[in-house]
Structures are given as structure tokens and as C-alpha cells.
Image: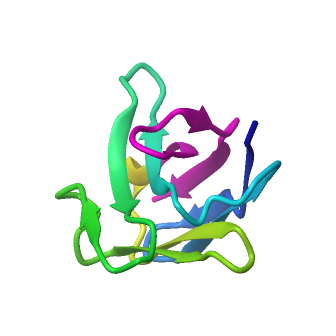
């Protein structure tokens, strides 16, 4: 069993940056595809970014392209999401997820609030 715990969320102003972290425990996630998702109040959960097992391949939602960067450290069993130039519409609960072939494991989320 894998436990994922997100951290790094908070209240920031538009234009600021935040770095979210996802720490895994229970087993290594070095073979997992990992991703970040978010859910804003009243909206469905949406994809933000994904990274393959060794970090060689990444993909982003259109709104994240050029502003967000996903990375991983398999030695530390962590995944990060660097978010720059934050906008009020980035306000959401951000989730870390991962698995061998799909997003089987999910964290509880970390809140990001961006004020205008």
C-alpha cells in the first residue's frame, strides 16, 4: 500500500509562486507514473501535469504549460509541482496521484488559494 501526502499549499497573491510536494510512503514509487490534479469549488477534478517513472517524459494541461513544472526525486520518493505566475483561477485543492499503470493511489490534497 502506498500513502501519498501533499504539502506546500497556501494563500498567495496573483503572480506569486508556490512549490507543492508529494511524499510517498509504504513502498517506492520509482516505477510509478505520477501526476497532479486539482479541483476547484463547484468544478470537476482536472488534470494538471504528469511525469513518467524516470522523469524523462512530462505532460501538462494547457493552463499549466509554461507556468508549472512537475519533477520527481525517486531517491527521496517525492514528486513536486513548481507553480509560477499564479492566477486567481488556479485556486483549488491540489492532489498528487500515482500508480504502475494508472492513478491508483491518491493523496488528500493541499489547498492553494490565489488572491487577486
Instruction: State which quadrant residue 75 falls in.
Output: bottom right
Residue at 46% in and 38% down: 103
The correct choice, above or below, for 15 with respect to 91 in the image is below
- Magenta segment includes 97: yes
> What's the residue at 52%, 46% (across, down)?
98
Count of numbered circles in the view: 0
Decide if residue 53 is on the left or right side of residue 105.
left
Quarter of the image where one finds residue 13: bottom right
**Is residue 24 left or right of 30 when viewed as pictured?**
right
Residue 19 x, y percent position in the rendering: 60, 73
Q: Where is residue 47 in the image (x, y as percent from the top left)?
A: 33, 44
**115 or 57, nearer to the observer:** 57
Is 115 included in the stretch rendered in magenta? Answer: yes
Q: Is the magenta stretch mostly helix, strand or loop?
A: strand
Q: In which quarter of the image is the C terminus?
A: bottom left
Q: Which of 49 and 2 is in front in this view?
A: 2
Q: Residue at x 32, y 75 (%)?
A: 67
Magenta residues, as a range?
91-116
Amino acid at each position: 500500500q502506498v500513502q501519498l501526502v501533499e504539502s506546500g499549499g497556501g494563500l498567495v497573491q496573483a503572480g506569486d509562486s508556490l512549490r507543492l510536494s508529494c511524499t510517498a510512503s509504504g513502498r517506492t514509487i520509482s516505477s510509478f507514473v505520477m501526476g497532479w490534479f486539482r479541483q476547484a469549488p463547484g468544478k470537476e477534478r482536472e488534470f494538471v501535469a504528469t511525469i513518467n517513472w524516470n522523469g524523462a517524459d512530462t505532460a501538462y494541461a494547457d493552463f499549466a504549460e509554461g507556468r508549472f513544472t512537475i519533477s520527481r526525486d525517486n531517491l527521496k520518493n517525492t514528486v513536486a509541482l513548481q507553480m509560477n505566475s499564479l492566477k486567481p483561477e488556479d485556486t483549488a485543492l491540489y492532489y498528487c496521484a500515482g500508480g504502475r499503470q494508472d492513478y491508483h493511489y491518491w493523496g488528500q490534497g493541499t489547498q492553494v488559494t490565489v488572491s487577486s
